[in-house]
Amino acid sequence: MKNKLIAPSLLSADFGNLQRDIEMLNHSQADWLHVDVMDGRFVPNISFGFPVMKTIQQHAKKFVDVHLMIVEPEKYVEEFIEHGADLVSVHYEACTHLHRVIHQIQNKGAKAGVVLNPATPVLLLEDIISDVDLVLLMSVNPGFGGQKFIDNTYKKISETKDLILGNNSTALIQVDGGVNLDNASRLFDAGADVLVAGNAVFSSENPEKTIELLKI
């Protein structure tokens, strides 16, 4: 059975009611909680850090998926794991020593993912694909929510799937950016395993129903 995992992005949650929104996700068909961490350097925006992670850790009952859009992630990955991250993804573009960082995450007991920006080719992952647990393909430019989906992502999903199969890797493929009810089924059909959805979930009138529909 193919994976059809939905990971709502807490970046789109109501931070005045974060506990309420996390508890809603706990009761929903969401599989993972996606946490976008931005530093204002790697991307032109700042999101949140460890105090918010502590709140997520206190209330989340599901798998916590942390996406670090930060420079020098090796300085912080272990603390994110200590604050409840089950999976930590780092950007190919931000890691001078990617192999080392991937194993640093795994040695701390978490799953490790590598993220590619829209203009970064999949073939650059050839020497790391057997080590990672997940490949996150950005389908918008990272840093802001609510952007338009980049159609070249479908081609990159196919290329990533070929790379995974060609290297006997067990990595999952995750897509983040502009995911909604119009493209979710096509993304799953193309080979994605996990879809991150922020605005599509939290701006809908019935977030739990939207999560359910994204999986169909």
Image: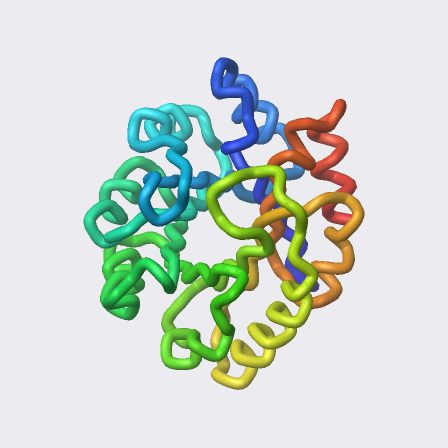
Please tell me whether residue 80 is drawn above or below residue 173 in the rendered image: above
- State the image quarter where residue 39 is shown: top left
Residue 67 in the image: x percent, y percent? 42, 47
Left or right: residue 182 versus residue 122 is right
Q: Tell me how many marks there are.
A: 0
Q: Is residue 51 left or right of residue 190?
A: left
Looking at the picture, the colour scheme in use is rainbow
Residue plotted at (24% across, 45% down): 76
Does 211 appear above or below 149? Answer: above
- The quadrant holding residue 156 is bottom right
Q: Return the residue found at the far top.
A: 16
Name the residue: 44% across, 40% down: 36
User: Which part of the image, by quadrant, shows the N terminus?
Assistant: bottom right
> Residue at the location (59% across, 55% down)?
139
Residue found at the far bottom of this picture: 166
Q: Is residue 67 above or below residue 153?
A: above
Residue 1 in the figure: left or right of residue 86: right
Furthest residue toward left = 75
Most distant residue in the front direction: 44
State left or right for residue 74 relative to residue 40: left
Q: Nearer the viewer, residue 207 or 125?
A: 125
**Image point 59% across, 30% down: which residue?**
25
Q: Name the spot of residue 5 as percent of width and height, x first.
A: 62, 50
Q: Locate residue 81, reporting x and y percent.
A: 30, 44
